[in-house]
Image: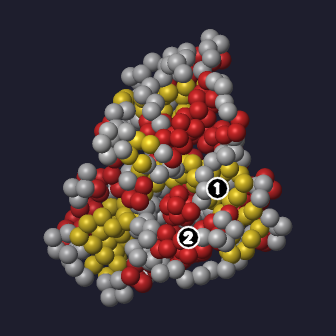
Amino acid sequence: MQGTIVFVGAGGAGVSNLVGILHDLGYTNLIGINKEQSQITQALEQQGVRIFPHGEYQVQADDVMIYSSAAEGSSEVQEAFRLRKEAHKPLMIWNYFEFLGEMSKYFRTIGFAGTNGKSSSSAMGIFAAKQVLPDFGIGIVGALVPDFGGKSYVLGGDKQENRKTGEQKGDEVSLHQDLRQIFEYIFSGKKLDYSLVKKYWFLVEACEYQRHLLHLDLEEVIITNMELDHTDYFRDWQDYQSCFEEVVRKVKDKVFTLSDLADKKILSHEKTIIVEEQHVDFQYLWGKHQQKNASLIAAALNYLTEGKKTEEIRERICTFKGIWRRMEYLKTTEKGAQIFSDYGHVASSIEVGYHALRERFPDKRLIAIFQPHQMQRILAGWHDFPAALQPYEKSYLYDIYAARERIEDFAERFRALQEEEKKNVPLEQVEDLGHLFAQHTGSDYLTKFEQVEAVIEKAGEEEIIVVYSAGDIDFALRKYLKLL
């Protein structure tokens, strides 16, 4: 194909995996655009992918663009749409989830969905499926995975190498040639061998935000759980439910879920297989939520392999090492405190994290540092967060990651909370809501990362510190701990 494949928002765990996949398939005409440097953009640059800040790349008429929804307002994305509309340029433009949907037309696709646990379950499922599922093609997760070489994706095929010449042979080369042909067809309409359509499996994390998972052409879907989230988009619980119910109607074959799913329509649907929770002896993981994830994955893979690889599936699941920012162990300090990072940003995630850590460290003091992700989530879960944070011996609230929100848009709801709390906090900046929320949850409020450093430096060997954040504090944490 001609032109450049431009990835806007390349520092995200989602868009970056597409960059990596195409790079591994031999594409050299790739560039990434991102607002700031991150652990992910550093890794892409090490692979030889050029990364630009916004405003330094001029979109061309023969480019292909794939962009993160968070970067939709960027100058590059806006220019691409302008060129296509006003100058009638033949630009091909997809947002990340639209492109996943385009990919899924050519693969047998399994989606991992749910409010919580979809990243962990998709990574665990892909790790097992690559070994046991015939014609495994591509697996994509919204997080970095140690078992995937620190990447957020994995390609199928077994590499075979001639020891004398170093030449690669066998399944990997053949598969990669097939995958390249599929992508070439998507990008340029080049001739496609139609025996490749729906030959390979594609396993992917499927996000419900803005109903993105409805783009996917799914054969199977695994639903981990459901509770109201993304209240900046979904009006209420019924609206949220309707998204998953529509997915179930669209799925071609089966839906796998547990009996405690909070949607009776899905539980009673003819496509649904209700999975019985079973115990798995993990080598590296702990926590009841991991047992649930493993039960769902084992049931789905046993179904797809017709029960012929039950022991192999179980053994594979047991050796899974977990994923980036999901109760991920980072480091033990000089004083002996152990530091963990977790993506948790809703109250139930923080509660699940507490129980997992308490199971693993029954005699330690557990300390939570929580960076809320979006004011909308704070307001929606106002009455749930105190109970989630209360069991920790100590909790800290870090400055809210507002993600394009404006405090004035929440003025009416903010004042209602002030009346409820019988507090009078000025409504001028996001930090004002942060102060009120910290008081509400019984947490100390931190506004600078140096304060986080002080908490860590004070902790000793009797303490476990977990940093919950879907925002930007994780990158600063890793730099401080000299992990980057």
Q: Looking at the image, is 145 positioned above or below residue 30?
A: below
Please identify the residue farthest to the right as the structure is shown. Answer: 270
Q: Position of residue 55 (x, y in %)?
A: 41, 24
In the picture, measured across the screen, residue 76 lies left or right of residue 270, that is left
Q: Residue at x 39, y 73 (%)?
A: 284
Q: Which residue has dot 1 on it? A: 111
Q: Quadrant of the N terminus?
A: top right
Residue 217 in the image, given as x and y percentages of width and height: 71, 47
Query: Tag 1: residue type?
Result: Gly
The answer for how far apart the CA atoms under marks 2 and 1 are is 18 Å
The residue labelled by disc 2 is 313
- Label 2: how many Cα within 10 Å (few below 14, some 14–19, many 20+): many
What's the residue at 46%, 48% (across, down)? Answer: 13
Front residue of 126/389: it is: 126
Residue at coordinates 25% horizontally, 56% vertically from top-left? 483
Can you name the residue that lies furthest to the top here?
A: 87
Whole-percent x and y of residue 395?
Answer: 37, 73
| Secondary structure under the numbered disc 2 in the rendered image | helix
Secondary structure found at label 1: strand
Number of marks in picture: 2
